Amino acid sequence: MTTTTTSLTTWRAVFAAAAVWTTLGAVPGLLDPGRMLALFHGVEPESPLVLLMYRGSAGQTFLFAIGYLLAALAPRRHAAIVALGGMGKVFYSVRLLMELAQGHGGSLALIAVVGDLIFVTLFAVFFATSGVLHGFLRDPAPATEGA
């Protein structure tokens, strides 16, 4: 097995694990948003609209779980999904850390932060070692006539 094949196999496993991790955070929020709001953020919903918004957020998170599954199938092709999902994990982790620092945050907050930041670190290693970042930074192809 070549280094490239081993590396590809490793990244596929990382992105499949990210899909599972993200699904574990998203699906409960879709099914029982009130309970998950309390477990992650330490607050009870103030209104039905808050529950609707939290469920919507869980739905968007679930879409990223599907995106990580796509990345597991073709890591280099779906690197943009990984980059966007990684940024989302950073922003959510910062938000939860701020809540915890203010004495808020639920019992799952720190678990979510640690798990998400582990994946962010792995995603950063992927971008640093895969050469994908070079493709993001390259100038776009010149426009063709009539485009």
Image (cartoon, rainbow, N blue to C red):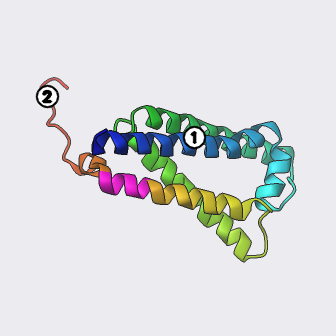
Q: Residues within 10 Å of mark 2 (few under 14, many from 20)?
A: few
Mark 1 lies on residue = 19
The amino acid pointed to by label 2 is Thr
Q: Is residue 42 left or right of residue 86?
A: right
Which percent across, then down, holds residue 14? 49, 46
Does the segment drawn in magenta span residue 126?
A: yes
Q: Closer to us: mark 2 or mark 1?
A: 1
The amino acid type of the residue labelled 1 equals Ala
Identify the residue at horizontal 38%, vertical 52% (top origin).
126
Q: Quadrant of the C terminus?
A: top left
Q: Secondary structure at mark 2?
A: loop
Instruction: Residue at 16%, 23% (x, y): give it.
Output: 146
- Residue 78: percent from the left, percent from the top? 40, 37
Q: What secondary structure is found at the residue carrying circle 1?
A: helix
Q: Is residue 24 magenta?
A: no
**Relative vertical location of residue 93 with respect to residue 88 in this rendering, above or below:** below
Region rendered in magenta: 123-129
| x and y percentages locating residue 53 in the rendered image | 73, 45
Question: Please, what is the dominant secondary structure of the magenta stretch?
Answer: helix
Checking the image for residue 144, the label placed there is: 2
Near-viewer residue (37 or 19): 19
Residue at image x 28%, y 41%?
2
Q: Would residue 90 be visible to someone looking at this image? A: no
**Closer to the camera in the image, 85 or 12:** 12
